[in-house]
Amino acid sequence: MCGFQVLNTVNAIGEISHNHPLLIAQPLVFKGKSALKKKLSTNEKKIKKDKITNEVLEWIFCIVIAVVLAFLIKGFIGTFTTVKQESMYPTLKNDQRLWLDRTIRTFNGKYNRGDIVTFEAPRGSNVYISNTNPKAVYEERQNFLEVINKDFLEVDKISLIKRVIGLPGDHIQIKDGSVYVNGEKLEESYLGSEVVTESFILNDFTVPEGYYFMMGDNRERSSDCRTLGCIPKNKLEGRVVRKSMAFRYIWKN
């Protein structure tokens, strides 16, 4: 923008002379124009930078929320799991995808005889396990990092999938190739007609309160509570669901 500046001269007696030859109209240039442009440009850059920063923070926030929700769902509601054992054959096949329902653990529900569950495999020595002391031995967590890795991230943790046979307080006997619960022969329709249940360390015992006794359906190739001992409830990770109303559109088997 520009204007016109009138230059007046003053004569010797102090009067303003309007007829002086220097009385001219000159363009008036605002010297603040470039500074204004520079300031506007700086403000635009700052606004753009702030916008990008806000978008990045929003993305980071969304990612953090998604990760937290994923851990909460996996830890308290359920998660998909894949069978990597043959101990439940032919009921479950190797590499079969399943849904592990963890709400039963979250709400301290009760497991029923016949439920298929997963649990943390004992790593302690089983030399002290006997019919009079049928409890599985677990190594204690050594530090907080190990608690996070195994209990939350589930890293460096071995899980087994088996069927619940004995409930807390049940008297279990394994004899003549069959299982007896509280003196009655257990009818196991899920087993093949030629399957024989052999006894190992545990064959005549009572399941302690707060513990469960599990075995694999493929009895001849299953390493289970017969040698590992009874599993405490807090080591059970959840109940396996093969088909459900909520997920039947996922599984087509």
Image: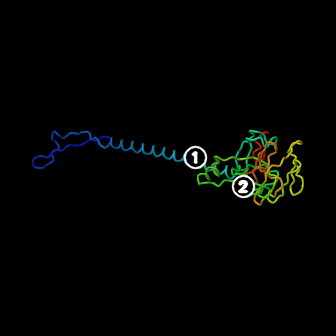
Q: Amino acid at mark 2?
A: Arg
Alpha-carbon neighbours of circle 1 within 10 Å: few (<14), some, or many (≥20)? few
- Rendered residue at 36%/44% (across/down): 39
Q: Earlier in the sequence, mark 2 or mark 1?
A: 1
Q: Nearer the viewer, mark 2 or mark 1?
A: 2
Which numbered dot is residue 227? none
Say which quadrant the C terminus sits in: top right
**Along the line of sight, which residue is nearer the eye, 1 or 38?**
38
Q: Position of residue 81 (x, y in %)?
A: 71, 44
From the image, tell me which residue sits under label 2: 105
List the single residue furthest toward the front: 127
Say which quadrant the N terminus sits in: top left
Q: Amino acid at mark 1?
A: Ile
Q: Position of residue 197 (x, y in %)?
A: 85, 46
Query: Is residue 154 left or right of 179 when viewed as pictured?
Result: left
Which element is circle 1 on?
Answer: helix
Query: Is residue 102 left or right of 57 when viewed as pictured?
Result: right
The number of numbered discs placed on residues in the rendered structure image is 2
**Along the line of sight, which residue is nearer the eye, 241 or 165?**
165
From the image, tell me which residue sits under label 1: 63
